Image (cartoon, helix red, strand yellow):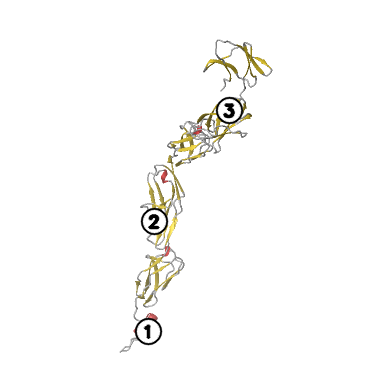
């Protein structure tokens, strides 16, 4: 029963006909009225959302939902359902309700889609520019506002780079590298792909080689470093760039089995199509090392218990005198014969000179000098023999002197006034294996002294 009415009079036929004709519309037409407004919502992506409105008024009510003031297609019911909402569905929703007596608009219901940042455009993968140019990297990101941007270089934050665009001015080679941007909001974080910036520039030396002091036979390494683009070529030089070292074409240069001739000043040259850069100099000082000992040539034969001089030199690996050796060496023989001097004195400037005595005869005797640290030296073989004896007989006014033919090298000398000695000039006669010298006595002198003399050292 709708619109119950009581009348205190009889209605006319026309009034009754009018009431009948309006039918369900009733006698009193009411405009729409909203009893329950649609409510705002905050959801995650892919959620299902329903907005509802409760309204009254004379039937029939018509509904039209809008998003940010724009009518939504087929959104003409008292409820609006959105499935799998995305960030693009976020905004202000409202509904307009109308009937034959008027219309009304609901309050706005805001839909917030909690969307983390995502990129719709990335920075370029590779950018190549000459030094001195300006460069800009751009991204486009979506997500629930507000979005915050932070650009990074080689993984580290760039100061004050907090927008969707990164601008670099007057770039140099040091600006070359990987750039990216991190975008954040209340609901998450997104990191862009890396953008490689290649700045083409002449070489710049970033690490210079340092001075090195090493010994002969050591392994030595020089280190240098340079930056530049395009790719750099390298060349080490010795004592000037006009003297390249063969095969030394990397930033690191190693010398094995170091020799004295390799001492000098080394430098690294880096080059590309844009120019050349040369490192500072690094001096390589080579200290020689003791390798062995060398004896002077010892004349042979030597004589039992007769001192003879020797000289021993400390030698390096290339047979130069090793002047830094100031120690002593043990003196011995290879066949075990003991020398009267078992050790040298201290070497001076790599030399020692002294005298030795051998107490017994020997054939092919080799002398040994040894410092006890693996460095030794052998003499050339010598023979050691007894000193030849001089025999004398008298016959009348003559004397006869005999001595062995072997060993050779001995001559007969005489003296009447020591310490002066003079050679006997008359040549001796060989009789068998002996020499014979006949001398007529001169009685004007009180005495004659005779000796055998070997002038060799």
In the image, is 245 to the left or to the right of 13?
A: right
Q: Earlier in the sequence, mark 1 or mark 3?
A: 1
Report the quarter where the N terminus lies. bottom left
Look at the numbered discs 2 and 1 and tell me whether their residues touch, using CB distance below 8 Å. no
Report the quarter where the C terminus lies. top right
Q: Residue 149 bears which disc, if any? A: 2
Look at the numbered discs 3 and 2 and tell me whether their residues touch, using CB distance below 8 Å. no
Residue 201, can we see it?
no
Residue 144 at x, y percent in the picture: 40, 62
Q: Residue 2 bears which disc, if any? A: 1
Q: Secondary structure at mark 2?
A: strand
Report the front residue among 135 and 271. 271
Q: Residue 305 bears which disc, if any? A: 3
Crowd band around label 1 with a 10 angstrom C-alpha radius: few (<14), some (14–19), many (20+): few
Q: Earlier in the sequence, mark 2 or mark 1?
A: 1
Crowd band around label 3 with a 10 angstrom C-alpha radius: few (<14), some (14–19), many (20+): some
Q: Residue 408, located in which quarter of the rendered image?
A: top right
In the image, is 162 to the left or to the right of 430?
A: left
Q: Quick check: 246 above or below 297?
A: below
Residue 207 at x, y percent in the picture: 43, 41
Report the front residue among 88 and 139. 139
């Amino acid at each position: 029963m709708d619109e119950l009415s009581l009348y205190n009079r009889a209605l006319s036929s026309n009034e009754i006909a009018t009431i009948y004709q309006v039918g369900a519309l009733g006698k009193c037409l009411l405009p729409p009225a909203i009893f329950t407004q649609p409510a705002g919502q905050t959801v995650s992506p892919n959620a299902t959302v329903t907005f509802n409105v409760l309204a009254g008024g004379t039937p029939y009510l018509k509904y039209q939902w809008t998003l940010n003031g724009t009518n939504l297609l087929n959104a003409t019911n008292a409820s609006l359902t959105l499935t799998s909402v995305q960030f693009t569905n976020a905004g202000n929703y409202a509904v307009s309700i109308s009937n034959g007596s008027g219309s009304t608009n609901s309050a706005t219901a805001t839909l917030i889609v909690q969307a983390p940042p995502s990129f719709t455009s990335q920075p370029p993968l590779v950018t190549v520019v000459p030094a001195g140019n300006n460069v800009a990297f751009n991204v486009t990101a979506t997500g629930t506002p507000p979005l915050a941007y932070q650009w990074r270089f080689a993984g580290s934050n760039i100061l004050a780079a907090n927008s969707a665009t990164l601008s670099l001015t007057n770039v140099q080679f040091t600006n070359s590298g990987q750039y990216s941007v991190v975008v954040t909001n209340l609901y998450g974080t997104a990191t862009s792909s890396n953008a490689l910036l290649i700045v083409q520039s002449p070489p710049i030396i970033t690490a210079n080689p340092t001075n090195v002091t090493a010994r002969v036979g050591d392994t030595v390494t020089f280190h240098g470093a340079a930056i530049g683009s395009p790719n750099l070529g390298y060349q080490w030089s010795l004592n000037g760039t006009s003297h390249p070292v063969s095969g030394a074409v990397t930033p690191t240069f190693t010398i094995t089995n170091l020799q004295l001739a390799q001492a000098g000043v080394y430098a690294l040259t880096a080059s590309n199509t844009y120019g050349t850069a040369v490192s500072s100099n690094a001096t390589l000082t080579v200290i020689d090392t003791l390798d062995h000992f060398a004896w002077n040539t010892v004349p042979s034969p030597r004589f039992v218990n007769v001192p003879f001089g020797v000289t021993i030199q400390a030698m390096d690996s290339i047979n130069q005198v090793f002047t830094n050796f100031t120690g002593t060496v043990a003196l011995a023989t290879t066949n075990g014969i003991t020398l009267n001097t078992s050790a040298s004195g201290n070497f001076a400037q790599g030399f020692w000179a002294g005298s030795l005595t051998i107490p017994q005869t020997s054939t092919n005797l080799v002398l040994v000098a040894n410092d006890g640290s693996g460095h030794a030296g052998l003499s050339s073989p010598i023979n050691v023999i007894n000193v030849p004896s001089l025999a004398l007989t008298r016959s009348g006014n003559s004397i006869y002197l005999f001595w062995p033919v072997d060993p050779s090298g001995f001559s007969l000398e005489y003296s009447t006034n020591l310490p002066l000695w003079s050679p006997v000039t008359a040549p001796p006669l060989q009789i068998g294996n002996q020499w014979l010298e006949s001398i007529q006595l001169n009685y004007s002198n009180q005495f004659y002294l005779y000796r055998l003399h070997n002038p060799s050292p």
